Amino acid sequence: KKAYPTFKFIGEESYSSGTRPELTDEPTFCVDPIDGTTNFVHGVPFACISLGLIYQKRPVLGVIYNPFLQHLYTGVEGQGSFLTCGTGSPVKLPLANPKPLPSLSQALIAVEWGADRGAPIITAKSNSFLRLAGDPNDGVPGGRMGHSLRSLGSGALNIATVAQGSFDMFWEIGCWPWDVCAGIVIAQEAGGVVTGSHAVLASAVDDPAVDPFKVTPEILTGRKYLIIRKIADTPQETGREAQFRIAKEFYDTVEDCDPK
């Protein structure tokens, strides 16, 4: 605030009073000083500082720093995203050439239980996790037999890991803009895409003119996020077409619910 006194600020305390500030065109920091608090408390080295900058109602800059592992992720709109480990040189993301992703059965999917453990949301998540991981040939109706599920315990680090290409996607319902703002920029600049709820994707299915991966203010603050890594082009489809196909397959699999 000293360095940028005219910039606005959104963080957990912005919402704690019960009011939710509207995004404006003014430069706005979106900050989570400790993302992965439970990990931090238990000494698990997957916690980070997440700093995003919103300008003209869209995320344009992201910084995620894990001080335990000394991993620094950065992304600036139009300039790419990078990972710096310790005192090393920045490495452009993704870390390796992206691979195709034929279906969810080849996907390593990041998910989280979240802080809201009420019956509606935890039931929807449990059912969704069962179908994502379960074997349809061994008693799991609608199972996709995903390669596996992972939970780092930090939304920001989950997204950063998608950006670097290690996770294929991250899905969460219930986290907040300051959990994802920085990661959204880093993932997008690494060729990843971001979409919101089932309804957002359905609107693009119904109307090809709708961009399913445009991060509007409603998506940024909507508390429902699906982030998919960069996917390689194939003779059959472009990477973006593959991302759209995977997003549709994913939302055909999981249950929707509304967070508190």
Image (spheres, rainbow, N blue to C red):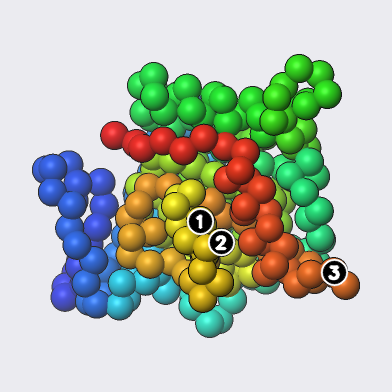
Left-right relation of 212 to 55: right
Q: Amino acid at mark 3?
A: Gln
- Pick out the residue farthest to the front: 206
- Residue named by callout 2: 205
Against 108, residue 59 (above or below) is below
| Crowdedness near tag 3: few (<14), some (14–19) or many (≥20) residues, C-alpha within 10 Å | few
Against 239, residue 34 (above or below) is above
Q: Residue at x 39, y 59 (%)?
A: 219
Residue 243: x, y in percent?
67, 61
Q: Residue at x 72, y 30 (%)?
A: 143
Q: CA distance from mark 2 to mark 3?
A: 19 Å
Q: Amino acid at mark 2?
A: Val
| Crowdedness near tag 1: few (<14), some (14–19) or many (≥20) residues, C-alpha within 10 Å | some
- Residue named by callout 1: 202
- Residue named by callout 3: 236
| Crowdedness near tag 2: few (<14), some (14–19) or many (≥20) residues, C-alpha within 10 Å | some
Left-right relation of 142 to 237: left
Say if mark 1 contacts mark 2, CB within 8 Å: yes
From the image, which quarter does the C terminus lie in? top left
- Per the image, label 3 sits on a secondary structure element best described as loop
